Amino acid sequence: MLRTLLDTGTSRSVVLSNFVKLNQLVDTGKRVTTWTTMAGSFTTRKVAKLHCKMPELSTSKEVERPCEVDEHTDRESSPYDLILGVDLLTN
């Protein structure tokens, strides 16, 4: 189970790399995205197609969305494994 934050202040969803399989990665060329947070800045270079189920909302629906991959943060040092941004919350 992923520790997940629904964050209306984040423009795109971000997942820790520990939870991404190689076959989920999407080729983005050499694109680099820089993120600025209250805790500091970090960059992402990869995007993964993430499949999510939210049983609290529906027992049968599954959502597939692109998610930025955070390759720099360790799970032990982060309170969340997945941050769902407004890209998922508004679509």
Image (cartoon, grey):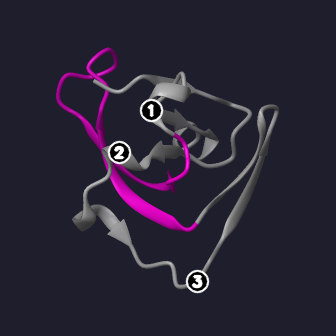
Amino acid type, residue under disc 3 in the picture = Lys
Please report whichever mark, 3 or 1, sits nearer to the chain's N-terminal start: 3
The Cα–Cα distance between marks 2 and 1, rounded to whole angstroms, is 8 Å
**In the image, residue 13 above or below residue 30:** above
Q: Residue 7 — which label?
A: none
Q: Which residue is mark 2?
A: 18
Proximity of marks 2 and 1: CB atoms separated by less than 8 Å: yes
Amino acid type, residue under disc 1 in the picture = Arg
Query: Magenta residues?
Result: 45-73
Mark 3 neighbour density, 10 Å: few (under 14) some (14–19) many (20 or more): few
- Residue drawn at the location 26% of the way across and 65% of the way down: 22
The Cα–Cα distance between marks 3 and 1, rounded to whole angstroms, is 25 Å
- Residue drawn at the location 41% of the way across and 50% of the way down: 17
Determine the secondary structure under disc 1.
helix
**In the image, residue 67 above or below residue 85:** below
Please report whichever mark, 2 or 1, sits nearer to the chain's N-terminal start: 2
Amino acid type, residue under disc 2 in the picture = Asn
**In the image, residue 27 above or below residue 54:** below
Q: Which residue is mark 1?
A: 75
Left or right side of 27 for 31: right
Q: Which residue is mark 3?
A: 30
Outermost residue toward the bottom in this view:
29
Whether residue 49 is in magenta: the answer is yes
